[in-house]
């Protein structure tokens, strides 16, 4: 088939992905054991998700990057439609537990559309950036401002749906991805300064509203939930609320601290952590293998990030670099926020730890993004172009 392409396997990038797949199976097994449950069912599900993710990675890697970018608008619309469908086809059980409509239930499985939106959002925003750069040979502050405004306008449906789903954490991921794209694409520094200043001012205002009674009333009118405000208050002084709103975060810090340097001894009584298998999966690593094990996992993430960036730069292709950098910044933010929340440095936002947190949708969506990065196309040098043209003229291609 014409749209499929052959490329050399990037084993240096494949290695950390494969190791994280294996690690995800182990941490889900360990989390189930620590909670006193039978791990066989959880392990089987995780193995199925890893196999499906590996297939998704392989298939996506065969699709040319320019084809994905060409149809990125359609993918974006489809992702928006899937997210909008949550208004009617949400998982009733999850809604009763969290008061949010973020999951679609199909049989025994749930799908979180926002995970797929991260990939579609990245591709479409990169496509709009490339179109802008192609049309504007000479960039000015005015043209950059028009470009930023256009990007923000196209982003409104995503942020509106995130707001309706009360998913503040994932909204932050999209903001970080946009910020990375603006920086790597060379948006004028004056515009970036204004944008960063506005975001910082908005963050300061939100903090003021969280810690004042009148501010709480304003936030409730904007459909913020009580638990979202409690998470910020719990982060500011967790020990003061350790038996109430900060219970999960304090328990997380105790669990990680109990691991010491090399992990808790066999005689150690496991620290109970709510939702250990999902938002707090890092506590499993910290408690079981201590500081050393936690450091190795963080190093594995950094090695993955390094390989993604290196693979993109090696292509000598602007589109490839934009895709990789935009996605990497979103990935780094998710890792930083999840681990930061687990050790008490940041407030809880419900952002999963990539690869390791329970959830097949997240794992498959990440694997699709990894497949895109595996399949990034190289931009041929002049010598290679001449060689290709010569072969073509001789009928060798």
Image (spheres, grey):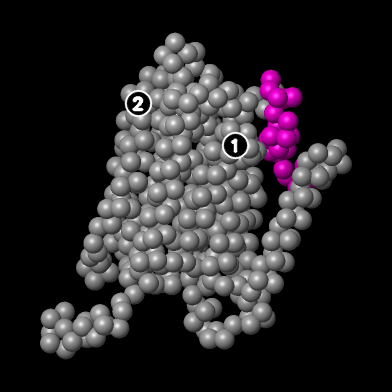
Report the residue marked by disc 1: 341
- Could you tell me which quadrant the N terminus lies in? bottom left
Q: Nearer the viewer, residue 50 or 289?
A: 289
> Which corner quadrant of the image does residue 219 belong to?
top right
Q: Is residue 256 left or right of residue 70?
A: right
Q: Nearer the viewer, residue 313 or 370?
A: 313
Q: Is residue 290 above or below residue 368?
A: above
Disc 1 is placed on an element classified as helix
Asked whether residue 210 is drawn in magenta, I would say: no
Disc 2 is placed on an element classified as helix
At a point 60% along the width and 37% down the height, the residue shown is 341
Q: Nearer the viewer, mark 2 or mark 1?
A: 1
Asked whether residue 227 is drawn in magenta, I would say: yes
Q: Which residues are magenta?
A: 220-243
At a point 49% along the width and 13% down the height, the residue shown is 269
**Residue 66 in the image, given as x and y percentages of width and height:** 37, 71
**Residue 332 in the image, given as x and y percentages of width and height:** 51, 50
**Residue 238 in the image, given as x and y percentages of width and height:** 69, 28
At a point 39% along the width and 72% down the height, the residue shown is 317
> Which corner quadrant of the image does residue 237 belong to?
top right
Using a 10 Å C-alpha cutoff, classify the residue at mark 1 as few (fewer than 14 neighbours), some (14 to 19) or many (20 or more).
many
Q: Is residue 385 above or below residue 94?
A: below
> Which corner quadrant of the image does residue 60 belong to?
bottom left
Q: Is residue 394 above or below residue 96?
A: below
Visible residue check, residue 92 = no
For the residues labelled 2 and 1, the Cα–Cα distance comes to 28 Å
Visible residue check, residue 229 = yes
The tag on residue 128 is: none
- Could you tell me which quadrant the C terminus lies in? bottom left
Q: Is residue 83 above or below residue 94?
A: below
Q: Nearer the viewer, residue 368 or 110?
A: 368
Report the residue marked by disc 2: 41
């Amino acid at each position: 088939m014409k749209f499929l392409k052959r490329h050399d396997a990037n084993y240096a990038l494949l290695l950390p992905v494969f190791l994280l797949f294996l690690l995800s199976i182990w941490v889900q097994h360990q989390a189930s054991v620590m909670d006193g449950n039978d791990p066989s069912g959880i392990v089987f599900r995780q193995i199925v998700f890893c196999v499906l993710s590996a297939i998704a990675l392989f298939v996506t890697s065969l699709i040319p990057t320019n084809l994905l970018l060409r149809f990125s608008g359609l993918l974006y619309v489809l992702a928006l439609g899937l997210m909008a469908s949550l208004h009617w086809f949400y998982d009733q059980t999850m809604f009763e537990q969290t008061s949010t409509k973020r999951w679609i239930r199909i049989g025994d499985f749930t799908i979180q559309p926002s995970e797929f939106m991260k990939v579609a959002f990245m591709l479409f925003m990169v496509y709009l950036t490339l179109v802008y750069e192609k049309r504007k040979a000479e960039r000015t502050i005015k043209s950059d401002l028009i470009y930023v405004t256009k990007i923000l306008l196209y982003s409104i449906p995503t942020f509106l749906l995130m707001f309706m789903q009360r998913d503040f954490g994932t909204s932050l991921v999209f903001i970080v991805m946009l910020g990375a794209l603006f920086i790597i694409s060379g948006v004028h520094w004056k515009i970036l300064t204004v944008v960063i200043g506005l975001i910082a001012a908005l963050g300061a205002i939100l903090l003021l509203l969280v810690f004042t009674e009148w501010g709480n009333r304003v936030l409730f009118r904007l459909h913020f939930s009580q638990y979202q405000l409690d998470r910020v208050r719990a982060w500011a002084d967790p020990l003061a609320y350790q038996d109430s709103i900060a219970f999960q975060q304090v328990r997380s810090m105790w669990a990680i601290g109990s691991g010491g340097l090399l992990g808790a001894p066999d005689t150690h009584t496991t620290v109970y952590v709510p939702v250990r298998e999902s938002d707090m999966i890092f506590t499993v690593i910290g408690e079981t293998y201590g500081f050393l094990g936690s450091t190795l996992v963080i190093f594995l993430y950094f090695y993955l990030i390094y390989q993604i960036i290196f693979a993109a730069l090696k292509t000598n292709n602007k589109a490839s670099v934009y895709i990789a950098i935009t996605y990497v910044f979103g990935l780094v933010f998710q890792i930083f926020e999840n681990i930061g929340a687990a050790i008490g440095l940041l407030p809880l936002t419900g952002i999963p730890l990539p690869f390791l947190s329970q959830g097949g949708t997240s794992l498959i969506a990440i694997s699709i993004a990894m497949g895109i990065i595996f399949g990034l196309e190289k931009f041929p040098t002049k010598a290679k172009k001449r060689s290709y043209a010569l072969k073509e003229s001789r009928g060798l291609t």
